[in-house]
Image (cartoon, helix red, strand yellow):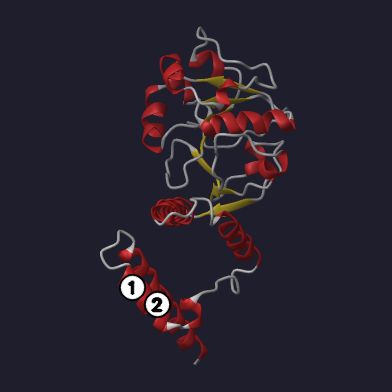
Amino acid sequence: MNRQVPESKKIEPIAIIGNGRAASHMKHYFASVGQSYLQWYRSSESNAKKSRLSRYKDKIQNLFKSSTTLESVVSKTQVVLLLLPDDQIEPFITRNPALKSKTVVHFSGSLHTNQAIGCHPLMTFGAQFYAEEIYKNIPFVVDEGVEFKALFPLLENPVHNIKTEDKALYHAYCVMAGNFSQMLWKNIQEGLEQINLPADIMSAYLLQNTKNFTKDSECSMTGPMIRGDESTIAKHQKVLSGHPLQDVYESFYQLNNQTKQLAKRNQI
């Protein structure tokens, strides 16, 4: 596999391997900026796993045909964007010698491999397409030493390089920030319904918290832990005894105390 980025000034099509949400969003983004692409995915899996997004008509006429082979697709381009689950990336490259001379790019946030270049888009890809401005502002966290613009010449996204040894920790942070927060919100939604409150009653509150944090993370938090209101915290701890979220509350309580202690030591 060629890890060198292409030097040609001619803007060639990019091959997209896969048919999941990331592939659908990237096709949509490429179409919006005029980047042509070719797509290949396993036809036997495409019908069973077809997403809502894949039903949309492509803006660029590069539709998948069942008779198209991987070899014929990648023969027409140099950059191959491999949008597969992390544990399938290296085996797929190994099984397909047609990729050996290509510049293979993957979107995994944690995987490092000499067989492909890592370019992780720091974004969650939902069931609906986004506004073009959102795509253009997605930060890409790219393997150290890789020139993003040489891979995707028509994309103007913010780009940040990352060391190999930092990738696993970086991706763990991503998972905690995105997935863990949503798991907590989901559990709280269910709890609210159990006390006869609408599940979406916190929507405005959560949205404003997110806006406050992104605007000023140092001053965005409020509540008893920030005020040091131990009386209210004790009430929470009592009512959560035996609750599935008891350990979560205690963990964040301890984290908040440790953060405060560390801040005090740094002021000395």
Looking at this rendering, what residue extends furthest in the top direction?
Answer: 67
Rendering coords of residue 49 (x, y %): 44, 23
Q: Is residue 233 left or right of residue 12?
A: left
Looking at the image, residue 113 lies above or below residue 193 = above
Front residue of 215 and 85: 215
Disc 1 from disc 2: Cα separation: 6 Å
Q: Callout 1: helix, strand or loop?
A: helix
- Residue 233: which disc? 2
Residue denoted by label 1: 237
Q: Is residue 45 left or right of residue 157?
A: left
Q: Residue at x 66, y 50 (%)?
A: 158
Rendering coords of residue 206 (x, y %): 56, 58
Q: Residue at x 63, y 34 (%)?
A: 129
Looking at the image, residue 80 lies above or below residue 187 = above
Q: Residue at x 57, y 27 (%)?
A: 53
- Residue 248: which disc? none
Q: Are marks 1 and 2 in contact (CB under 8 Å)?
A: yes
Question: What is the three-letter code of the residue carrying label 2?
Answer: Ile
